Image (cartoon, rainbow, N blue to C red):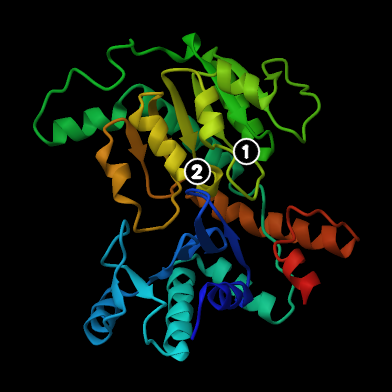
Amino acid sequence: MMNVETVRDFCLSLPEVSEDFPFDETTLVFRIRGKIFAMIDLENTQWFVLKCEPELAVELRERYEEIAPAWHMNKRHWNQINLFGELPDSLVISMICHSYDAVVSKMPKRMREGLAATEHNIIVSNNPAHNANAVAEFTIGVILSETRNIARSNMALRMGTWRTTYPNSATEIKEMTDMTVGIVGYGSIGRLVAYKLSVFGCKIIVADPFVKSCKEDYVTLVTMDELLAQADIVTLHARSNGAIMTDREFELMKQNSYLINTARSYLVDVEAFRKAMDSGKLLGAAIDVFETEPDIPEFYRNYDNITITCHLGGLTINSYQDAPAYGMNNYLNYKNGSDELHFWVNKAQLQQN
């Protein structure tokens, strides 16, 4: 009979699966390319949570008493499995594979093909800068939308209401010239965000452990702790494989500040973010990336002071037109002996094979 150890071993045997603890110290999460497909509480290993297509989810719940709608998840798409029951191992393995495949099927075609390539020992490279300008522009857009209540005003008028008060009204709605923007991560996107922000006249500070100096005179390099304490707006563009915004970082943030995430969902500890919102630490947020897409956690919809968008950051015709040129440049770099980690997507997986 499968248990937490055998379940974990099987999940990690699937192509490009990683594990982490984004919510707390006991909820173990399994991801494929950053997207969650399985979870288990190490303090209560009886229940194992998996994604499932809605029709099949209902059928399995009716057939097996060990399978039920997942607690604290979208019950239409997630099941919880009682590992202490009588389910055959073959069924549990089948459900894990189904959950994995369900998440993979929602990924862009290029990502699905990348997984298949890894299985056949084929090198996969990405285009790390082809959508940088698109994401940078979008970041500026959601900063303005959140701080100036653009989306909320639009929605109110569509609902027949002339709205005059907003979550940030009590603290006075500031212009960009009167704010400090902190950019976490100063790679291709972070640099473009800073450049585009420079015309607004705001103070721009940057934290990046890989950057030792900034040549741009409109940017000041600071530590992460200094950035969090000073910034009215914190926008994430970091190169990281895990959460960089946890309880500690939210505690260090300036009171009544904003969090912007157009980068990767896993950069933010979701529970820490919820606590910061509930406590009033954050005046607002703009989120374009989520742990589970398109079925985002319900709580995001419950806050009036969060601008949520459907992972639109890189979605422009220009980014798609630029992709072939960047791809060819990556290929030529590799042929010339370059070993830049940022474009070889499945290097670690291939080296393990």
Q: In this view, does 66 lie above or below 264?
A: below
According to the picture, the residue beneath numbered tag 1 turns out to be: 189
According to the picture, the residue beneath numbered tag 2 turns out to be: 269
SS for dot 2: loop
Q: In which quarter of the image is residue 13?
A: bottom right
Q: From the viewer's perspective, tell me whether residue 325 is left or right of residue 341.
A: left
How many numbered marks are there? 2
Q: In this view, does 208 lie above or below 268?
A: above
Return the disc, 2 or 1, that comes first in the chain's sequence: 1
Q: Which residue is found at the position 44% from the left and 28% from the top?
A: 143
Q: Can residue 285 be seen in this view?
A: no
Q: Which mark is residue 55?
A: none
How far is the residue under mark 2 from the one under mark 1? 22 Å
Q: Quadrant of residue 59?
A: bottom left
Q: From the viewer's perspective, tell me whether residue 39 is left or right of residue 210.
A: left
Q: Which residue lies furthest to the left in this view?
A: 160
SS for dot 1: helix
| Along the line of sight, the residue nearer the viewer: 121 or 331 | 121
Quadrant that contains the C terminus: bottom right
Q: Which residue is found at the position 43% from the left and 74% from the top?
A: 99
Q: How crowded is mark 1: few (under 14 residues within 10 Å), some or many (20 or more)?
A: many
